[in-house]
Amino acid sequence: MKGKKLTHIDESGNPQMVDITQKSITKRTARAQAIVEVSTEISNLIKRNELKTKKGPVFQTAIIAGVMGAKKTSELIPLSHPIGLEDCQINITHKKNSIIIEGIVSVTGKTGVEMEALTAVSIAALTIYDMCKALSHEIRVKEIKLLEKTGGKKDYKIKSL
C-alpha cells in the first residue's frame, strides 16, 4: 500500500470529510451483495411462497428497507456526503439455503455510491433476519461486499475467486 493514504484523515491524523468541490460530475453506479443463510425450515417456506410474517411479506419489506437505508447512508456513516440518489434497485433471489440480496445504486454527481449500495444490502439483510428470527435463530448474515463501481476516478469490479 505504498504511496496510498486514507482520504478521510488529514495530515495531522484528524478525521475529515473529503473535499469534492473540484471533482467532475459523472454518472456513478455501485453494485453490492449480501448473502443471508437460513435454516431448511425457512428455505422451505420460501420455496412454497409462504414466507410471510405479521410484519408483512419478508422480501418486499426487505426491499423497501434497503432503499430506505441507502437514502439514509450519510446519517449512518460518519463523513459520508449526503447524496440525492437517482436510482436504487434491490433484487432478492433464493438458492438452496441462501438468500442473495443485490443492490444497484446510481447518481449523477461528484462522489461515488459504494457506501449507499453496501448500506442498502446490509439493511435488507438485517430486515430479513429481524422478520425471520421468530422462526429460527439459525440465520447468518454474511459476505457483504462491493461487486463493482463505475464513474469515479477509477472503476472497480470484484475479481472472481
Image (cartoon, rainbow, N blue to C red):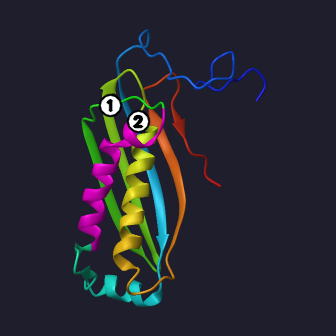
**Residue 67 vs residue 79, the one in the foreground:** 79
Q: Give the class, few, some or many, for how many residues have Cα within 10 Å of label 1's Cα (few <14, many ≥20).
A: some
Image point (61%, 46%), residue name = 159
Q: Residue 72: within the magenta? A: yes
Seen in the picture, residue 86 relative to 19 is either above or below; the reply is below
Image point (42%, 49%), residue name = 119
Residue of label 1: 83
Q: In the rendered structure, which amino acid carries the disc numbered 1?
A: Ile
Image point (65%, 55%), residue name = 161
Residue of label 2: 113
Q: Quadrant of the N terminus?
A: top right
Q: Give the mark nearest the N terminus, 1 or 2.
A: 1
Badge 1 vs badge 2, beta-carbon distance below 8 Å? yes
Residue 101 position in % (x across, y down): 40, 61
**Residue 54 vs residue 114, the one in the foreground:** 54
Q: Is residue 95 left or right of residue 144?
A: left
Q: Which residues are magenta?
A: 58-78
Number of marks present in the image shown: 2
